[in-house]
Image (cartoon, rainbow, N blue to C red):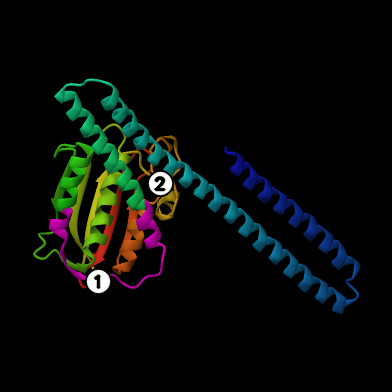
């Protein structure tokens, strides 16, 4: 248990003790004033208002402490995601500057530095997109987007980025869809699908087995389902994972590096398209499925 969790537990316990003491005193006061109804009623109303204010204040305090903890975790994660590739790039550049290397070694170093640069770019883009997602902006310009083609494109890029085979990440289609076109923001939808695929890979553990599926849904909608066989999600966390900065608990999940922004961005994009995103999992160690559902007419 962290120091902040202990502090939250302390404040909750203190609140319960104080409220219990206040109720006991109020009962004693009611017994003492049972023959003076006017004072009794006024006292009960005042007491109820004081208790209600105290409860609201406690809830607000605990909520703010949790938000602060999430923000600190986010800052720590982003710092790590920025410092690690920068340190790696610096080390390889210093090696190139001070040592005589063969062409093969140079090419290998360049490849590693390009990978670190991509990692830096991805982290910065996630932070910027999260900032935009949190703003109440106008609906982005919409265009016809072939969801089938977009999914296949994102899967190909994800395989390249994570060095995966076609068996490790595959694409499926169910329902014999004649039309897979939706009205949406192409860049936004690409970001949403990419984040779901990257999230599935990150939380797959040592064995990546990701399936991206395009399927029909009710009310003339389409679904992109991304299924993995990774660490899974506890049932009581299925909705919480879409919060900004939120990181799922559990030993396996805590070992995964990230900013806690990817799924938050997906949810924001889904809402702007009149759709939704939700998670399903049988529990820890049972894998998970994330579904992005979009209306065809935007």
Local crowd size for mark 1, using a 10 Å CA cut-off: few (<14), some (14–19), many (≥20): few
The reply to whether residue 201 is in sight is no
Q: Are marks 2 and 1 in contact (CB under 8 Å)?
A: no
Residue in the picture at 87% in, 65% down: 29
Nearest the viewer among 205 and 216 is 205
Nearest the viewer among 122 and 142 is 122
Nearest the viewer among 160 and 118 is 118
Residue in the picture at 45% in, 50% down: 246
Residue occupying the far bottom of the picture? 38
Residue in the picture at 21% in, 33% down: 111
Q: In which quarter of the image is the C terminus?
A: bottom left
Measure the alpha-carbon separation of dots 2 and 1: 28 Å
Residue located beneath label 2 in the image: 259
Residue located beneath label 1 in the image: 141
Q: Is residue 86 magenta?
A: no
Q: Over which residues does the magenta segment extend?
A: 127-151
Which of the labelled discs sits on residue 274, or is there none? Answer: none
Residue in the picture at 86% in, 79% down: 38
Residue 72 higher or lower than 102, as above or below? below
Residue 247 higher or lower than 36, as above or below? above
């Amino acid at each position: 248990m962290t120091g902040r969790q202990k502090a939250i537990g302390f404040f909750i316990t203190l609140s319960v003790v104080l409220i219990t003491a206040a109720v006991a005193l109020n009962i004693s006061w009611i017994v003492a004033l049972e023959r003076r109804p006017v004072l009794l009623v006024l006292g009960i109303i005042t007491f109820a208002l004081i208790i209600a204010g105290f409860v609201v204040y406690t809830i607000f305090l605990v909520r703010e402490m949790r938000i602060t903890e999430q923000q600190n975790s986010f800052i720590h994660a982003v710092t790590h995601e920025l410092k690690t590739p920068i340190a790696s790039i610096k080390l390889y550049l210093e090696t190139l500057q001070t040592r005589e290397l063969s062409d093969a070694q140079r090419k290998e170093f360049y490849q590693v530095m390009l990978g670190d640069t991509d990692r830096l770019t991805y982290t910065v883009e996630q932070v910027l997109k999260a900032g935009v997602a949190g703003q109440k902006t106008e609906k982005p310009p919409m265009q016809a987007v072939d969801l089938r083609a977009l999914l296949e494109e994102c899967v190909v890029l994800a395989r390249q980025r994570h060095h995966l085979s076609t068996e490790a990440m595959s694409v499926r289609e169910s329902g014999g869809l004649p039309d897979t076109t939706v009205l949406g923001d192409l860049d936004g939808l690409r970001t949403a699908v990419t984040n779901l695929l990257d999230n599935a890979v990150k939380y797959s553990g040592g064995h990546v087995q990701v399936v991206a599926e395009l399927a029909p849904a009710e009310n003339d909608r389409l679904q992109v389902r991304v299924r993995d066989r990774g660490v899974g999600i506890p049932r009581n966390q299925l909705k919480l994972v879409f919060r900004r900065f939120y990181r799922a608990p559990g030993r396996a999940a805590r070992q995964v590096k990230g900013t806690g922004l990817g799924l938050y961005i997906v949810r924001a994009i889904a809402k702007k398209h009149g759709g939704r995103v939700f998670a399903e999992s049988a529990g820890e160690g049972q894998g998970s499925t994330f579904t992005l559902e979009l209306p065809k007419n935007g």
